[in-house]
Image: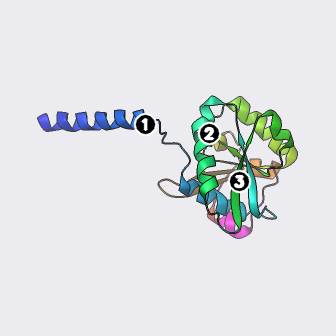
Amino acid sequence: MKVNRYIIRILISSMVLLGCTGASFADVTKKDISVITKIISLLEDGPKGVVEVAVITGDPATKSDIEAFSSIAELSDGASGVKLKPVAVSYDGLATTSAKIIFIPEGMSDANIDKVFEIAKSRKLATISTSPKCLQVQKCAISISSSPAVDIKLSVSASSVTNVKFGTTFRMIVKEVL
């Protein structure tokens, strides 16, 4: 009985300490950036070299994810001929950005996801996210998770309206969501 209480105290203390660090379990990781970079390199007629990725600013709930994405992407060596360059863009500035890829961070509200997706549709910009919610509402063409294992999902409806295309080989290894 005492051992169980001791273990419970350790677990609770660990959870409290982890919660106090300010880190979120949903923050973008180096592995996420690596997967995103490789996916962008596999887009048919996709951008190569230094690729600007719009990260949407102005939503306090997304700040942690945006900071993680930007700092890791800037330090990343790139892969397969693609180096990500995060570009901070306001919701209003998204209509005129030169970025061809939009990163939709964890924590974005449904209304803001809708707003971003409408611009992505009209400008044929690829939307990519680490947020499962974005895929569920079919506003992200590509959704990735790299933990515990790499999981890439392609929204058939979102990718068709934003003109995101992959070769047959890539489509065979991803999960397509209707």
Image: magenta residue range: 165-172
Distance Cα–Cα, label 1 vs label 3: 27 Å
In the rendered image, the residue lying farthest to the front is 75
| Relative depth, front residue between 88 and 16 | 88
Q: How is the image coloured?
A: rainbow
| Relative depth, front residue between 10 and 121 | 10
Would you name the residue on which mark 1 appears? Answer: 21
Label 3 environment density (alpha carbons within 10 Å; few <14, some 14–19, many ≥20):
many
Secondary structure state at the residue bearing disc 1? loop
Disc sitting over residue 85 in the figure: 3
User: Residue 14: in sight, yes or no?
Assistant: yes
Q: Residue at x 69, y 56 (%)?
A: 84
Disc sitting over residue 5 in the figure: none
| Relative depth, front residue between 119 and 141 | 119
Give the percent coordinates (x, y) of residue 46: 79, 62
Q: Is residue 148 left or right of residue 160?
A: left
Along the polypeptide, which appears first: circle 1 or circle 2?
1
Would you name the residue on which mark 2 appears? Answer: 133
Give the percent coordinates (x, y) of residue 60: 62, 29
User: Residue 107: in sight, yes or no?
Assistant: no
- Residue type at tag 3: Lys
Q: Is residue 93 left or right of residue 73?
A: right
Give the percent coordinates (x, y) of residue 154: 68, 54
User: Predominant secondary structure in magenta?
Assistant: helix
Q: Residue at x 80, y 52 (%)?
A: 100
Q: Are marks 3 and 2 in contact (CB under 8 Å)?
A: no
